Image (cartoon, rainbow, N blue to C red):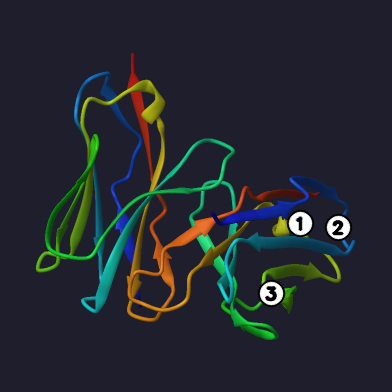
Amino acid sequence: QKEVEQNSGPLSVPEGAIASLNCTYSDRGSQSFFWYRQYSGKSPELIMFIYSNGDKEDGRFTAQLNKASQYVSLLIRDSQPSDSATYLCAVRIANSKLTFGKGITLSVRP
Amino acid sequence: SQTIHQWPATLVQPVGSPLSLECTVEGTSNPNLYWYRQAAGRGLQLLFYSVGIGQISSEVPQNLSASRPQDRQFILSSKKLLLSDSGFYLCAWSERGGRWETQYFGPGTRLLVL
């Protein structure tokens, strides 16, 4: 059974801090990994995707992938109140559909 | 650039009534299309996906059905709604081919069944 697990939340960090969001997956055949942000009442929007071990940076966001340990994380540097949202981790096996985690809610305190 | 539309944005329907939600994609050809449901406090549940006109795969047995009458049009239907059908319905598309088929979501339809 393909499973994607995310830390139980919610996660609260002060403004300017680093927020660390973690996700583990069960299927070793997983090949690509996605992070979506979902504001309350809105649809998910893609933040980043990663497919190689290591780090991938985009502005204040860094995705980290460790296939040996089967986890993927998202770091948000210099967190802003506008980053307050639910973050969804999604995993794809080649030519297959995405499996989503249940999401973790991040709150950035001013 | 590609855009995805869904309508209606919100819908309140009585139990037992029919349902039709529509999704259209612009700016791309031959996309993969998906219907998801997000119930309160739960994750995204894939309901249907389609790789082409008339090709529908169902992920979860239920009283919903999907159709793809045109390349960039995806419709979610029900003959008789249940209370448990309430939720946030999301349509998504991806460009076919390759390992990194990124899915992009529409604005969603919020359905309340009373």
Q: Which residue is mark 3?
A: B62
Q: In front: B101, or B78?
A: B101
Taking A75 as reference, is B47 above or below it?
below
What whole-number distance in Å separates the C-alpha atoms at marks 1 and 3? 13 Å
Residue A37 x/y as whole percent: 42, 43
Which quadrant holds residue B100?
A: bottom left
Q: In front: B104, or A93?
A: B104
Q: Residue at x 33, y 18 (%)?
A: A109
Q: Are marks 2 and 1 in contact (CB under 8 Å)?
A: yes
Which amino acid type corresponds to the residue marked 2 in the rendered image?
Answer: Val
Which amino acid type corresponds to the residue marked 3 in the rendered image?
Answer: Gln
Q: In front: A13, or B32?
A: B32
What whole-number distance in Å separates the C-alpha atoms at marks 2 and 1? 6 Å
Let me know if residue B28 appears in the view: yes
Chain of residue at mark 2: B
Q: Secondary structure at mark 1?
A: helix
The dot on residue B83 is: 1
Residue B3 x/y as whole percent: 60, 54
Q: Which residue is mark 2?
A: B15
Chain of residue at mark 1: B
What whole-number distance in Å separates the C-alpha atoms at marks 3 and 2? 15 Å
1 or 3: mark nearer the eye: 3
Let me know if residue B114 appears in the view: no
